[in-house]
Structure formats: C-alpha cells, structure tokens
Amino acid sequence: KGMRTVQMTFEDNLVKSVDQAAKKLHTTRSAFARLALKEALRSLKIKQLEHQHRQGYQAHPAAREEVGVWEKEQAWGDE
C-alpha cells in the first residue's frame, strides 16, 4: 500500500478546523484527511448503489405477489 504526496488547496478556515479535529483525535492532518476522503468515497459509492437500486425498481417494479407474501411477517411494534 504505497503512499503518494499530493498538494491540495483548501480555505484557511477549513484547514484550521481540520487541524483542530486532528489534534483532538491525536492524529495528523494527513491521517485525518485520508480518513475523511475514504468516508466520502464510501458515502458516494452507497449513494450510487442506492440510485441504481431505485432505477432498477422504477424500470421493473416489484409485483404485488413478490412482496405481499411477507406482509404477514412484518412486526411494526405497535400491535
């Protein structure tokens, strides 16, 4: 797992906030940024998969008989 040094430009107040958060978490600015970027990429992937899921159901909606059989199994806790 190689590392590469990259140069990025951020607003001063963002750098200050990142530095404060990194200090509070006892980590470095770089480690904090790596974690934040990984989380952002994970979140983006989830959003893309959810979008594909919605598109699939819009193109091919589930038939009543596909989901109706499970209605009796649902427990909503208010019964």
Image: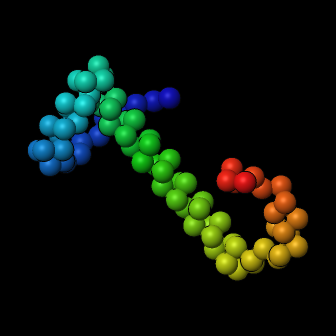
Residue extending furthest top?
A: 26
Which image quarter is the C terminus in? bottom right
Q: Residue at x 14, y 49 (%)?
A: 11
How many numbered discs, if any? 0
Q: Quadrant of residue 18?
A: top left
Residue, far bottom: 59
Q: How is the image coloured?
A: rainbow
Percent coordinates x, y for residue 31 in the rendering: 34, 29
x, y (%) of residue 29? Answer: 26, 30
Q: Residue furthest left?
A: 12
Tell me which residue sits at (39%, 43%) in the image. Answer: 37
State the residue lying farthest toward the front.
Answer: 79
- Residue 74, image quadrant: bottom right
Q: Residue at x 63, y 70 (%)?
A: 54
Displayed quadrant of residue 55? bottom right
The one nearer the camera, 63 or 55, is: 63
Rendered position, 57 above or below 15: below
Q: Percent position (x, y) of residue 70?
A: 84, 61
Asked whether, in this view, residue 3 is left or right of residue 71, the answer is: left
Q: Judge left or right: residue 10 versus residue 37.
A: left
Q: Is residue 27 above or below residue 14?
A: above
What residue do we see at 60% from left, 60% from top? 49
| Residue 61 position within the rendered picture, expressed as x and y whole percent measured from the top left | 74, 77
